[in-house]
Amino acid sequence: MVGVKGDEQIRTDATGHPINRMFADVPQDEPQVFAEPGFEGEIAAFNLFAYLSRSNVTWNPSVVSVCKESLYCPTTEEYILPIVHGNDRVEWFIQLSDEIVWDVADRETGAPRAKVTMRAGDCAAMPADIRHQGFSSKRSMLLVWENNSADLPALIASGKAPQYPVSF
Ligand SMILES: [Fe+2]
């Protein structure tokens, strides 16, 4: 996790991570941590928005926490995702700021399946059998959460794991 001793450190000007010009308004203050004696080296907190505002590549995940195979991979976005991403697993999206419009299509045929407009606070799950391209005309921040297990594509292909995140 970002900020923990021996792991990824907080981004600053000094680490070569200037604030992206599209995120100049993002506050850069950091949380204060008051650890009980004896736990000082085990507790960390950081300003996720400030960290993301200093990402040097847009549409590119910053892995900020890992819990077994569960990864939080937030991104910043500007303009157009320069590739069409083909999913091989479910992705959960929580829109942290601004807006992204997703064109969602069948992964194999490219046939359109949905247009998803996500605004700050919206949550969506992209299934494993789609391809998608995002458009963020101003800028945005997005939390991507996924299961990183290397076994997932084979489990999904064999039908042992579902293409969808949840059944209602
Ligand atoms: Fe994707």
Image: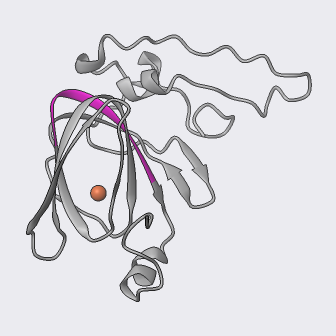
Q: Which residues are magenta?
A: 135-145
Q: Is residue 88 above or below residue 13?
A: below
Residue in the picture at 40% in, 89% down:
158
Residue 118, given in percent of the width and then of the height, sits at: 26, 38
Across and down, in percent, residue 110 comes to 9, 69
- Residue at image coords 29%, 65%: 87
Q: Quadrant of residue 13?
A: top left
Q: Residue at x 57, y 35 (%)?
A: 2
**Which quadrant would the N terminus be assigned to in this image?**
top right
- Quick one: which residue is furthest to the right in this view? 37
- The answer to whether residue 50 is left or right of residue 113 is right
Name the residue nearer the viewer: 1 or 168: 168
Residue 148, relative to residue 13: is it above or below? below
Give the percent coordinates (x, y) of residue 81: 17, 45
Q: How many marks?
A: 0
Question: Which is more toward the observer, 116 or 63?
Answer: 116
32 to the left or right of 89: right
Q: Is residue 143 magenta?
A: yes
Q: Measured along the vertical axis of the image, is residue 25 above or below residue 104?
A: above
Location of the C terminus (image quadrant): bottom left
Query: Left or right: where does residue 144 sit relative to residue 149?
Result: left
Extreme residue in the front direction: 168
In the shown orientation, is residue 89 left or right of residue 150? left
| Magenta stretch secondary structure, dominant | strand
Residue that appears at 85% across and 29% down:
39
Determine which quarter of the picture holds residue 107: bottom left
* Ligand 1 visible in quadrant: bottom left
